[in-house]
Amino acid sequence: MTQYDLVILGAGSGGYACALRAAELGLRPVLVEEDLVGGTCLHRGCIPTKALLHAAEIADSARESARFGVHATLDGIDLAAVRRYAESVVGRLHKGLTGLLGSRTVEVVRGHGELVGRGVRVGDRTLEAPYVVLATGSAPRTLPGLEIDGRRVITSDHALGLTELPDSAIVLGGGVIGVEFASAWRSFGVDVTVVEALPRLVPAEDPEISTALQRAFARRGITTWTGQPMTSVKVDENAATDAVTLTVESGRTITADVLLVAVGRAPTRTVRTDERLRTETEGVYAIGDLVPGLQLAHRGFAHGIFVAEEIAALHDGTRPPVPVRDEAIPRVTYSDPEIASVGLGEEAARQRYGEIETLSYDLAGNGRSQILGTRGMVRVIRRRNGPVVGIHMIGSRVGELVGEAQLITNWEAFPEEVAELIHAHPTQSEALGEAHLALAGKPLHVHS
């Protein structure tokens, strides 16, 4: 019988990261996966949706090229070709990942796995080890009474499989998934309405960021209904109309070709963990989307690496790793404009620390942003006379700035310390520097 040190159920972001790190540390892991290694992120989430959004950016560039002195025409969107492009990216990454697992001699067992005591049963085979890691991820969430038919009422999984664009679409849910699809579809020429039950879009972000996104969407022709809970959905099966109508609590109705249900994702199983990701069953850990909190692939990576190092430390008595904190994890929404944030929002910072200071730097003063033609801001939150505890940004490409923002917040840097750093000109990273200069009391390209 093969001896394993840990059995990992699920080969998505968290699962395969755990396996790779465990193998590096001299442990013998085995991965159980009924689908493809890489999971939702690689095959139905992060990668294909960002490829879709990149194609949407290309469409916008062609459509708006004249304002840059370049005359081009946009003849149309071939959604089947867009899918082939996205699938080619996914295919290359999947091939690389399978090769990487093979090079680390990580065994992958194909099939549906079920937790059985200290092991996982796959068909007529039971894989046993001192430790089991649950990494089965999440699935699209729906609402009571809302029937997903995969044709007129769809999830993000179905949306990625479309071969033709609808003329009009309702996006039910103004969170990350909803605003990303709304943004891409609008770039492709679809008439889009986003319906959100809460008072603002991207409700997990700071209110100023939500307001800026809603204004940007209005300029792009995306209609938004906020504070409008759904009461009913009706699909008209008449061949002549064949549409879907959504009614909200206020009595307003809207009809479109498709309704995308983007009300978040639900974990595939219910588990409780402590800060070290241990479940209530001894020797069993849970990672990624199974753990309440941020549902992000890179959180899953971090969880997987943490648990592998935790098990290695228990195995050989070395120093245990530091637990993963959600507030230390950067977050990016890849809509147009992009949103990127890390650390505490203003309300959370005020509740924790009492007195705080905030500063919003307008990208209108940033040369690179003007060249790109984007609007937005960098918003910095610090403890009064203390370190920076949160950074929130909106604008084209700000996702590429969140790495530096993460260093600032996680290393508890003071604005005065960041102000000493010289940022290359002209770059958007200067906006981070300018915001900290201003918060340190020595503004440059800011009206004082």
Image (cartoon, grey):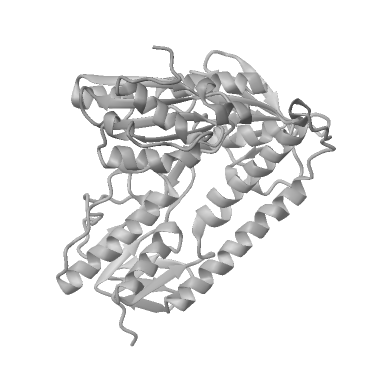
Choose top left, top right, bottom left or bottom right for residue 214. Answer: top right
The quarter of the displayed image where residue 241 is located: top right
The residue positioned farthest toward the left in the image shown:
317
**How many numbered marks have been drawn onto this rendered protein structure?**
0
Q: Nearer the viewer, residue 293 or 117?
A: 293
- Residue 130, percent across and down? 24, 73
Q: Residue at x 46, y 43 (%)?
A: 265
Q: Position of residue 9 (x, y in %)?
A: 39, 65
Q: Nearer the viewer, residue 400 or 219?
A: 400
Quadrant for the N terminus, please. Answer: bottom left
* Residue farthest toward the bottom in the current orientation of the protein: 1
Q: Is residue 369 left or right of residue 122?
A: right
Q: Is residue 129 left or right of residue 40?
A: left
Q: Nearer the viewer, residue 75 or 141?
A: 75
Instruction: Give residue 60's position: percent from left, percent from top.
Output: 71, 33
- Quadrant of the frame with the C terminus: top left
Nearer-the-camera pick, 100 or 370: 370
Residue drawn where x is 18% and y is 61% of the image: 320
Do we see residue 272 in this rendering? yes
Instruction: Please name the residue shown 21% across and 50% down the image.
Output: 274
Residue 293 visible to the viewer: no
Please report the residue visible at 55 percent of the width from the left and 34 percent of the height from the top.
Answer: 178
Q: Is residue 60 above or below residue 89?
A: above
Residue 374: x %, y % from top left: 59, 27
Residue 21 in the image: above or below residue 146: below
